[in-house]
Amino acid sequence: MTPTIYILNGPNLNLLGVREPHIYGHETLDDVRQSCEAQAHSLGLQIDFRQSNFEGDLIESVHEARDHAAAIIINPAGYSFTSVALLDSLKAFDGPKIEVHISNIHKRESIYQTSLVSRTADAVIAGMGLRGYLAALKEVADRLAQNNA
Amino acid sequence: MTPTIYILNGPNLNLLGVREPHIYGHETLDDVRQSCEAQAHSLGLQIDFRQSNFEGDLIESVHEARDHAAAIIINPAGYSFTSVALLDSLKAFDGPKIEVHISNIHKRESIYQTSLVSRTADAVIAGMGLRGYLAALKEVADRLAQNNA
Amino acid sequence: MTPTIYILNGPNLNLLGVREPHIYGHETLDDVRQSCEAQAHSLGLQIDFRQSNFEGDLIESVHEARDHAAAIIINPAGYSFTSVALLDSLKAFDGPKIEVHISNIHKRESIYQTSLVSRTADAVIAGMGLRGYLAALKEVADRLAQNNA
Amino acid sequence: MTPTIYILNGPNLNLLGVREPHIYGHETLDDVRQSCEAQAHSLGLQIDFRQSNFEGDLIESVHEARDHAAAIIINPAGYSFTSVALLDSLKAFDGPKIEVHISNIHKRESIYQTSLVSRTADAVIAGMGLRGYLAALKEVADRLAQNNA
Amino acid sequence: MTPTIYILNGPNLNLLGVREPHIYGHETLDDVRQSCEAQAHSLGLQIDFRQSNFEGDLIESVHEARDHAAAIIINPAGYSFTSVALLDSLKAFDGPKIEVHISNIHKRESIYQTSLVSRTADAVIAGMGLRGYLAALKEVADRLAQNNA
Amino acid sequence: MTPTIYILNGPNLNLLGVREPHIYGHETLDDVRQSCEAQAHSLGLQIDFRQSNFEGDLIESVHEARDHAAAIIINPAGYSFTSVALLDSLKAFDGPKIEVHISNIHKRESIYQTSLVSRTADAVIAGMGLRGYLAALKEVADRLAQNNA
Amino acid sequence: MTPTIYILNGPNLNLLGVREPHIYGHETLDDVRQSCEAQAHSLGLQIDFRQSNFEGDLIESVHEARDHAAAIIINPAGYSFTSVALLDSLKAFDGPKIEVHISNIHKRESIYQTSLVSRTADAVIAGMGLRGYLAALKEVADRLAQNNA
Amino acid sequence: MTPTIYILNGPNLNLLGVREPHIYGHETLDDVRQSCEAQAHSLGLQIDFRQSNFEGDLIESVHEARDHAAAIIINPAGYSFTSVALLDSLKAFDGPKIEVHISNIHKRESIYQTSLVSRTADAVIAGMGLRGYLAALKEVADRLAQNNA
Amino acid sequence: MTPTIYILNGPNLNLLGVREPHIYGHETLDDVRQSCEAQAHSLGLQIDFRQSNFEGDLIESVHEARDHAAAIIINPAGYSFTSVALLDSLKAFDGPKIEVHISNIHKRESIYQTSLVSRTADAVIAGMGLRGYLAALKEVADRLAQNNA
Amino acid sequence: MTPTIYILNGPNLNLLGVREPHIYGHETLDDVRQSCEAQAHSLGLQIDFRQSNFEGDLIESVHEARDHAAAIIINPAGYSFTSVALLDSLKAFDGPKIEVHISNIHKRESIYQTSLVSRTADAVIAGMGLRGYLAALKEVADRLAQNNA
Amino acid sequence: MTPTIYILNGPNLNLLGVREPHIYGHETLDDVRQSCEAQAHSLGLQIDFRQSNFEGDLIESVHEARDHAAAIIINPAGYSFTSVALLDSLKAFDGPKIEVHISNIHKRESIYQTSLVSRTADAVIAGMGLRGYLAALKEVADRLAQNNA
Amino acid sequence: MTPTIYILNGPNLNLLGVREPHIYGHETLDDVRQSCEAQAHSLGLQIDFRQSNFEGDLIESVHEARDHAAAIIINPAGYSFTSVALLDSLKAFDGPKIEVHISNIHKRESIYQTSLVSRTADAVIAGMGLRGYLAALKEVADRLAQNNA
């Protein structure tokens, strides 16, 4: 059976490609989704790609992933830095968890530097733009293969 | 008239009994609800037992309690540590407010040690598991009796 | 065409006039809305006045404002101090952004003193009660006139 | 054999009921002792109820409890916040340890907010006045029953 | 009798309009004075408009206001962040006190973010440029009317 | 009846005059006692002069003072900086409380600079050596006279 | 020759007795001056009693004291907490330096708790009201006598 | 011409595969080198793979890269957290700079959480083990292609 | 005359060998005493070996040592981190002062890392178990020999 | 035309050569002025040399320099560490600004280590005594020559 | 086979006996080496005694010790406080690790108080001068004997 | 004999004139060396001009200077902020020590603001570019002349 990977996107990411394109590039979140689908397909995976501006929605997607997903890729955006509740939900997910940030958050002002989610993520990728999602999918595929080996 | 007690449960508590049972025990949130109902009944109270992963839902339940509840018992879980908005809503509730935590949060890593909600709660019970809810109900009953005396 | 101003109100503001009237006064949020409508009318503006207890709702109203509003007036209440996500959404709005607080938050306990939203607001008005909204509308009108000049 | 519970009270608690009755109520420490004895009796327990203003006395009571007590209930009062030595003694006690505070310490000025003793206590009850001791006894009984089950 | 409002301006504000006009605009302090006079006249108030680079002068103006002014509007500029003495003088003034900053200080580097004067001001207006003084005068008029009502 | 003043001396003060005389002078604690007795006599007061190296002893002297003393003069020495329990005991004493330090503690290394006892003392005298006790007695006499007036 | 003592009073002390009499009492600064003159006379001293709201004035009075005064008594008020320059000037004065505060500053909010002047003062008296000045004069007399002995 | 990528490895990485294999895996640094070579080859790149335990060596490799490398991939290991000098050298390199950590440093104790090197890196990959290097090479290839496009 | 060395042991050390033997080993405090006696004898010294759970007792033993001991070896246990009073007493002892900790306190949680006593100790030995006492005795013997040379 | 350089000296510098000569040397401020005049003359510059103990005076000298000086050399003394207002005035001066300290402030206690003025100064010279002024004049001459080149 | 003990000395220790002999004594590092050799011989050990001013050298000596040494004694001198890389290398050494400091670092200024190396050392000896090395050798011998027993 | 001055340059300074010329200017380190040689010659001094990217090299140059140099001028660059070991080596050099920084480090981000080396330097010059070295040589010449006078 093709494993499903949840790809969760946090607040304001629906504006990707529209907001400050000189920083975040011209690719929209839909472009990200399509690239991820292609990449997943080539890796023998399928994805469930979601975005929400609600902390509660993201938490419930993580809960749902417990039953339906083999791994989670999450770009928690603004909730990275403030949501203990999201961190707690992710702690309750046993599969691989990869955190992705489009920009290198460690270069930004101090409120953007310390992600709570990183306390439970297996790996963190920051600053690779859309390509960060693809690298995360590759990492997930490798980890799942490793676990099955 | 039988007084109603709102028992509010924050994010991820829907996973109780399922998530990390060696820490949180095997009782589910539904077990908690049933025990609370029995305890409430024996104390001459009735309960309205809710769980939400949304900060806004919890706030609106607190608002609703202003008209329909004699007291609030709340386990704010991850929002304990981050929600000024939930704190503000509770400040606007005049009846007894008891805060419950299943584990002793004061023994955990620093991000879990300081509850904002404790700034307005009348009493705080931590580390007594499911029994913490029952002790909170008992405390509510005693406080209501005292106020009526 | 009459420019629309979004006036966004954060958590617990639906209790205005009811909660602690000795502090916040007896005017309700509906009174605020009506005063704002009158003031907007006299300034050649129209308003879209909203309140939500959900962080995600406020973020989505800000997103919507990108297409439908000439300016935003926001009283983020409890989310002022904790929401990086709301801050991020406001950074993506290009028109005038005025932050309003009913009380002078700088006189309160430390958790209420540093608004994240102030990092992107053009102007901040605190401590003027209902009148703060009217002054904010006046400021918006002046800024829009200036931009058109 | 009836298990013995040590109930240890820290500095200034001998003034209970006399000092600031508008805050701490009119019940004296002797009232607390009598209520605890009654509650213990009904739970099939007996208590050894002590108060001392000396850090060393409290430590030695904890040592003594290693041989004579099934559980400890402790209200460390002012030593909660400053005594690493008392914390260390409690770490060497293997049975249930319940920490009780008459008022909700988390609402007080900062020097009263962080109890060192909470780092080793199994559970913490704050803000329930005299009733906190009774809830602690109930919790002890439940834990002992559980251990014997 | 026409109430007098003291409008006090702190250090370096004599350079307004001359210093960094791209930030502070081209209006001089004299322009501010004239606009304030017009606004005051239309509100049935008169103003006493002063600027000083000396902390002691500002303090003595506040003392003088105790006998001669119905309200104080103050832009403490650089002394906002360092003068406990100016704060103390304002605490001794009983009428309305409105603090004005031309730019939004909360967006600036950390030494400019926390005004000591805000601890006693009734209201704070930041980021509205010259218009901040006019809004402050309007607020003063409304507060005086309210007090007389 | 001649009012009694408790003069309490904390840890290591029994070494006064012996330890580091170039700093603390050559007067012993007995010299201090004798000077205090003479001064008290001339002011129509009598004193109960004590020293202890035990925190618990000092607390119990404060408790005793509740019934037997009109005022307390205390040099808490090393316990000034660490004893919340001693602070709590003094909060329960209603008469005048004067804190005395032989040296000016504010000039010393940081661990000696912040006295917890100062949070409840009515007045603090530091750096006047033995004379600090005499000034404290004079202050007590004046306060008692004032209260009786 | 009768030694002269400079008694320097910092900002806002000219309002003494007028401002918040329930806290600072009804005695004016002129009352303080007269009491000090009487006390000085009885101790064989004369005083030069000054008040200024200007940091520079206080510094220059300290400089002048180098040539004309045997000792300085200073109540630096608001400058206590912020003036490194005043501290530096006092470091250059070799005679006895006594710091006086009318209220017990150590009980106040944090910005009022740490006096820079205390780093060089020989003694500090806080919380004794007008009597603090008289005790300071007595201390000066004793120190001068001691130096002459 | 085939672009050269410098892959720099900091202190203790020569022990990879030998030290704590349960954490860092069984692959040695030579395995990493070989995998990188293969990956580079398939991407049309060549690599210069180095390890040093000397801060100065790493700095000089970065300097050398200015003339000989199209991009730098660096795992600064222990120097990540302490070397301002290494950070400065990297600031002087204009091509793509990717920082790699074998484990997720953000989950470790505080001294390992804040990398100075991240202040200048374009992207950061942590927690992907050996695969992190391969993803970094892929990222470099994509960035170089993009720059050439 | 054989010099006497005071060996002082702080709170909870009476439980040595009993409490957490996997950490602290199986040797009891009496074993430590006997080893110290043997070691002292071989070095031409005699010891006075004490343990107390009371801060005041330890302080008074230090005072007594001023007259009866040539050196002090102290394991202050929990009071290491909190007792300014014990630190002060040791400052008044002129002979060699060696501080011993059974475990390496610097590896423990933060509350156990900074010993106040180390501010006055001549040497500190941590992590050598019972052998730390013997090394301390050897150090004392060497220092006394050196002083006599 | 000979360019004029303002050389501004802050509080207490009028005591130079008189106060603590073992630290600050025996040269008076007048000696500094004369050396500066000679040095300026040889560099084709003229100086306006001032000292004030008033923050406001220094600010107004900086304002005046905007019209009359080609460069500013300033030794802000005690105001270095506390005056945001002085910093602001210097930000409004466009020519070269050199900060001079007679001693090496970075070696002193912490309150003297961080100069606010350094945030805007072009260069800082500390620890070179009177020679620091001469080096500053040389630097000013070189910068003016460079600008004219 | 005689076990080899690596004794590693950090930066500036080559100046021992030459630099500040009043503090560090007159014994040179060569004297330390000779005493260690004698002591090692008597304990049935041999030593490899090294000093380097290079962080990288010390790290590589620790790596080398993995194959050639039974234990490490290290005086990391200035690198104690700054080298995460040295700490990491020591974490990869499994045998006994004893940290030695010639002076009692805990009495020095704050930058010298917290050794990173102590986080992995088994034992720490500070303030015993040359004798600290001998005590460390004795401790190593005892630990090796214990392990072999 | 012509005194020799060591001029030591820390990491990355070999890139001077090449790296970010808009900030650091176009002069290379070799230009600095030549200017220093000329300046030294005219002052009757000779220089030994070195650069290293290795902390250990700089330390050993300082050691060497003990025998061969009359003074040290050092630009520690990135090691200024992190090297306790370099600070320690400089403390062991008795002659004049002048610290030079090309840019004004006090205006940079916080990690570049506090130089450890400044704790032992006699004087610090920052922000004068190449001219800072020449001013330092002049200062050295003056100090040596003074010492010989």
Image (cartoon, coloured by chain):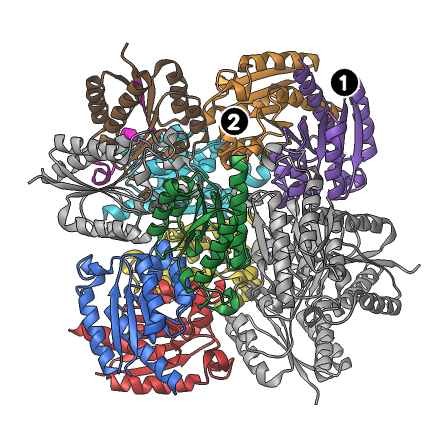
Chain colours: A brown, B orange, C cyan, D purple, E yellow, J red, K green, L blue
The residue beneath circle 2 is B77
Residue drawn where x is 58% and y is 34% of the image: B106
Residue drawn where x is 18% and y is 72% of the image: L34
Chain ID, mark 1: D
Query: In this picture, is J132 found above or below C120?
Result: below
Residue J74 placed where, x, y %?
37, 73
**What range of the chain is rendered magenta?**
A5-26
Chain ID, mark 2: B
Determine whether, in the image, residue A8 is placed left or right of residue B137. left
| In front of the other: E46 or D141 | D141
Determine whether, in the image, residue E61 is placed left or right of residue J43. right
| In front of the other: K113 or L20 | K113
| Count of number-bearing discs | 2
Residue B33, quarter of picture: top right
| In front of the other: C36 or C108 | C108
Determine whether, in the image, residue C98 is placed left or right of residue J141. right
Dot 2: element: helix
Label 1 crowd bin: few (<14), some (14–19), many (20+), radius 10 Å = some
Asked whether the viewer can see residue E116, the reply is yes
Amino acid type, mark 1? Leu
Query: Of tags 1 and 2, which is closer to the observer?
Result: 1
Residue J127 placed where, x, y %?
40, 73
Q: Is disc 1 in contact with disc 2, using a CB cutoff of under 8 Å? A: no
Which label sits on residue E23? none
Determine whether, in the image, residue K74 is placed left or right of residue L126. right
Dot 1: element: loop
Residue drawn where x is 47% and y is 68% of the image: K20
Asked whether the viewer can see residue B66, the reply is no
The residue beneath circle 1 is D43
Query: In this picture, is D103 found above or below L93?
Result: above
Residue B144 placed where, x, y %?
70, 23
